[in-house]
Amino acid sequence: MAKPNYAFEKRQRDLAKKAKKEEKRQRKVGSRENPEAKDSPEPTVPPPADTDTPS
């Protein structure tokens, strides 16, 4: 029976942890640059004024 390679397992855990941390950092940086992106995915545009009807 093969013995477990603890160094490999530890390296894989560390790489996964590092990737998750980097992804979280990217999300934080993105939310700082565009704070409205999280709350509303599409910007709301007011309807155009009705200029076709003569007054």
Image (cartoon, rainbow, N blue to C red):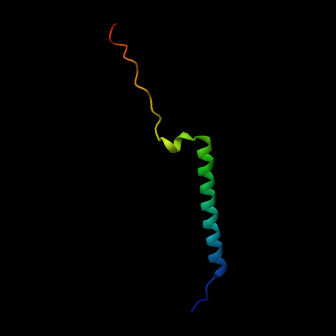
Vertical comparison of 7 with 17: above or below? below
Relative to 27, 41 lies left or right: left
Quadrant (top left, top right, bottom left, bottom right) of the C terminus: top left
Q: Quadrant of residue 44?
A: top left
Q: Tell me the residue at 46%/38% (across/down).
A: 42
Q: Tell me the residue at 48%/40% (across/down).
A: 40
Most foreground residue, 35 or 12: 35
Vertical comparison of 41 with 20: above or below? above
Vertical comparison of 29 with 13: above or below? above
**Outermost residue toward the right?**
7
Give percent across and percent down for residue 14: 65, 69
Give percent across and percent down for residue 41: 47, 41
Q: Quadrant of residue 2?
A: bottom right
**Outermost residue toward the left?**
53
Give percent across and percent down for residue 30: 60, 46
Give percent across and percent down for residue 9: 62, 77
Q: Tell me the residue at 57%/92% (across/down).
A: 1
